[in-house]
Amino acid sequence: MPRLVLALALLGLSGPVFANEPYCEEPWFIRNLIFDRAGYCFSSPLGQAIFDNADCTGTDVVLSPRDREAVALIREMEDLLDCNMDTSVQTLSTLPELNQLRRFALLPIPVDAASGCIGYLGPELPLLVAPEAYGGPVMGTLTRESSILFDFLPENGWEFVTVYPNGWEGPPGPSGWVELGQQQPHCREIAG
C-alpha cells in the first residue's frame, strides 16, 4: 500500500482521514449503493437521505459473489483510510459527483491511489455503463489527446475511467467502462 501513503503525502494528509472527508465518502457511497441495489433498508439518517428506502426489502440482503467481493475490498480500503463516517448527517460534500455513479450498471471498486494517462494516443473508444458482457448504453468517448484518470480496480481487461478531454486543467468529461485489455494504454506520460 505504499501508493496510498504517497498519495496522502502529496495531498498534504499526514494522519488518518476522519469523518466524512471526500476520501471516505466515495467508498462509503459505492459500498452502500451496492447494498441499496440489493434491497437493503437503511436506518441511519445519512443512509435514508442518500438512498430511497421505498423499494427496500430488509437488512438481510443477498449480494452476488462479485458484489460481496467488492464490499469486502471497499471495507478494507475504508479501514486503511481510517474512515469513520458520521451517519447522523443527511448529506455528503461530494454527493453531486457521487450521484453520477448511479448511472452505471456495474459499480466500480475504488483503489487506494489513482494513476493517470496524460495525452492518450490510442484509438477512440466508447465508455460504457458496464463491461460489455453486462451490456448497456454508451456514456461517452475516450478521445485521443485526452487525459485519463484511473482510480478504480480493473475488471477482466476493462477499466472504469474518467476522461479529461482538455487535460487536467479542464473539467472532467465522461466516465465509464472502457476495454483497454491487460496492457497500459499508450500515452505521452503516465502519472502515479
Image: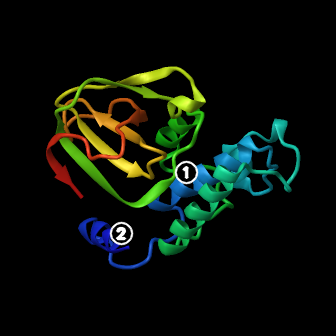
Q: Residue at x 75, y 39 (%)?
A: 52
Is residue 19 placed above or below 59 in the rendered structure?
Answer: below
Give the residue type at disc 2: Leu
Q: For mark 2, give the secondary structure.
A: helix
Q: How many marks?
A: 2
Q: State the image quarter where residue 164 is shown.
A: top left
In the figure, is residue 156 to the left or right of 126? right
Is residue 107 placed above or below 191 in the rendered structure?
Answer: above
The answer to which of 191 and 18 lies nearer the viewer is 191
Q: State the image quarter where residue 85 is shown.
A: bottom right
Query: How far from the left and from the top, in percent, is residue 21?
Result: 47, 62
Mark with earlier residue (2, 1): 2
Query: How far from the left and from the top, in percent, is residue 42?
Result: 78, 52
Q: For mark 1, give the secondary structure.
A: loop
Query: How far from the left and from the top, in percent, is residue 191?
Result: 20, 54
Query: How far from the left and from the top, in percent, is residue 24?
Result: 50, 61
Q: Residue at x 27, y 71 (%)?
A: 6
In the figure, is residue 86 to the left or right of 35? left
- The residue labelled by disc 2 is 4
The colour scheme is: rainbow
Q: CA distance from mark 2 to mark 1?
A: 23 Å
Q: Residue lying farthest left?
A: 188
Is residue 129 placed above or below 82 in the rendered structure?
Answer: above
Q: Residue lying farthest bottom?
A: 15
In the figure, is residue 54 to the left or right of 33? right
Instruction: Assign the N terminus to one quadrant of the image.
Output: bottom left
Q: Residue at x 38, y 40 (%)?
A: 161
- Contact (Cβ within 8 Å) of mark 2 with mark 1: no
Give the residue type at disc 1: Leu
Instruction: Assign the C terminus to one quadrant of the image.
Output: bottom left
Q: Residue at x 31, y 35 (%)?
A: 163
- The residue labelled by disc 1 is 92
